[in-house]
Image (cartoon, rainbow, N blue to C red):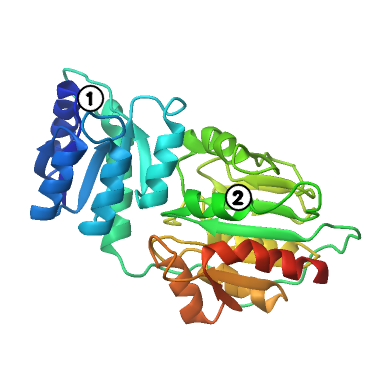
Amino acid sequence: MRIAIVNDTPIAVETMRRIVKKEPNYKLAWVAYDGMEAVGKCAADTPDLILMDVLMPSMDGVEATKRIMSQSPCAILMVTASINRYAAQVFEAIGYGALDAINTPVWSHDSSPENNYGLLQKIATIARLIGKSSRQQFISSVPSKPSRNLKQLPPLIVIGASTGGPKALTTILSQFSQQNFHAAIAIVQHLDAQFAPSFASWLNEQTSLSVELASVGCMPEPGKVLVAGTNHHLVMRSNLTLGYSQEPVDCFYRPSVDVFFTSVARHWTNKGIGVLLTGMGGDGARGLNLLRQAGWHTIAQDEKTCVVYGMPKAAVDLGAAIEVLPVEAIACSCIKYLPMY
């Protein structure tokens, strides 16, 4: 796997260079010290993965990500010195196509494994993602019957997203009004748990709805948006509260959209709307199909407005989506179908 480093701080470059060079399966492709240089080098020699700094002179990592993804696309991992301080820039970059983000690795003279583990784990995950066209499926083909039948449950909108998801989510959520919105929303976005609190806070600023991290034992409520907040799988439990599960442990995506959608299809006794947004891979397609089989209205984002037409395409190919819509039209469709539930 050929990896490029884009960072204006020499010590950060050297730290990541050492980490990359220690792994026999990784090769350093090139180094750039600002976004403009990275755009040029990527056009001439596109690597498998770029470790992209957020703040740099001449051109920052957000603009560089935007240009690279439109001109010579490849996998990009954002690297930032402070998650909370630069959360908005990180999520904007993910909206343009960056796959994930991580803290800048800390310099150590011995390059000890514990100091490198986070970055190496991220790189390994991305290597699997871009190197595999399919994965072992673990979802059953027929959903179980709902375990309980409680009255007065709100209609529920469940949304799964990955690459490009933050931008798509803001487009959708910004169209909902707290005053006349009676549905509950739960979101699984492929994002490392350390970014989850900042992500929820950032989303909260983009909508009049209340956005918070899903906690163990909470129940979906009208007008509230709950976001998966750990690296375990968000699940709907038989008592209709949310929780987290490590199972299946061998699931490639954590948190998994498929795992969440499947648990909702099994346990949520009211109907609702399932939405699968932009993202690489196929996570969520089978879960969306189970929601459709359970009587839900299902929507996949269309190819034109996706940053990566992977997850929605898998759903469309499976026949899981009743509607295939541009991201700007998804909120209107949800509002249209909510009175039916």
Q: Is residue 158 left or right of residue 154?
A: left
Image-quadrant location for residue 258? bottom right
Quadrant occupied by the C terminus: bottom right
Residue at 59% over, 70% down: 299
Q: Is residue 117 above or below residue 321?
A: above
Mark 2: which amino acid? Leu
Question: Label for residue 207?
Answer: none
- The reply to whether residue 276 is visible in this rendering is no
Q: For this rendering, which residue is in front, 235 or 334?
A: 334
Residue at 60% over, 65% down: 330
Question: Label for residue 234?
Answer: 2
Q: For this rendering, which residue is in front, 131 or 315?
A: 315
Q: Are marks 2 and 1 in contact (CB under 8 Å)?
A: no
Q: For this rendering, which residue is in front, 311 or 183?
A: 183
**Where residue 201 sits in the image (x, y, percent)?**
58, 34
Q: Secondary structure at mark 2?
A: strand
Residue at 43% over, 54% down: 164
Q: Secondary structure at mark 1?
A: loop
Image-quadrant location for residue 323? bottom right
Mark 1: which amino acid? Ser
Q: Is residue 293 left or right of residue 202?
A: right
Q: Is residue 48 above or below residue 12?
A: below
Name the residue beneath numbered marker 1. Answer: 112
Image-quadrant location for residue 86? top left
